[in-house]
Amino acid sequence: MSELRELAEWTGWPTAMALLLLGGGYAFWLLKNRLEHLKEVNGHLEKSWGGRYTCERCGVKVVSPAVGERMPRSFRMSGTFQSLPEGAAIWACVANGEGRKRQYWPQGGPAKIDKQNQTWDARVIWIDGNPGEQREVAVMLVGEDGQALIDYYIKAGEENQRWPSINHLTRDMKECISHKVTFSGEEVV
């Protein structure tokens, strides 16, 4: 606020208010164009899949580890899929909570995809808790916008050494599977 007061004293209040309105209008125009671009990208993704960009259509499944299996802090997950939209990836995310309070922590990079054998392999790099507690890993179908969000999450985490959760998913992030494992308390497999 003191900067606005200094600007007003230097240029006069009408000029300062005009600059403020002009800057706000420009910011609104940028935001509007970005939203239109995102709608176009998501619309293209939906059209390329006939409006059915869904987990059911992709047929993503977990093969390993088994539900409830005892797992250390870091482990590998693998599974199968029937088909993937162009530009989509599979991510394993440690998850917690339900509904609007659902939280996600993306793990170890996108899954390695073998299109020929229709398999995927992902690395979970950190689960915690007390030995014997169940932990949840969400297997996510992630489009380009969601991958941009995850890339930012990883970059910010690496720079700040803090990993807050992702609480709001983009429209092209779909939670396909909620897979529960039991934390063994061990460090690695």
Image: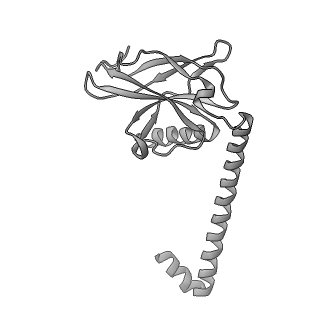
Residue 110 sits in which quadrant?
A: top right
Q: What is the number of callouts on the image?
A: 0
* Residue 8 shows up from this direction: yes
Q: Nearer the viewer, residue 175 or 106?
A: 175
State left or right for residue 177 relative to residue 70: right
Q: Nearer the viewer, residue 122 or 80?
A: 80
Q: Residue at x 62, y 26 (%)?
A: 58
Residue at figure coordinates x 26%, y 21% from the top left: 132
> What's the residue at 66%, 23% (across, down)?
83
Say left or right for 121 vs 114. Answer: left
| Up-down relation of residue 150 to residue 2 (above or below) | above
The percent coordinates of residue 47 (x first, y second) are 73, 39
Rendering coords of residue 10 (x, y %): 57, 84
In the rendered image, is residue 12 in sight? Answer: no
Foreground pick, 136 / 186: 136
Q: Position of residue 30 (x, y in %)?
A: 67, 60
Q: How is the image coloured?
A: one colour
Q: Tell me if residue 115 comes above or below residue 157 in the rendering.
A: above
Expressed as whole percent of the image width and height from the top left, the position of residue 71 reads 36, 18
Q: Quadrant of residue 12 in the image?
A: bottom right
Query: Quadrant where the C terminus lies?
Result: top left
Residue at x 59%, y 81% (from the top left corner): 16
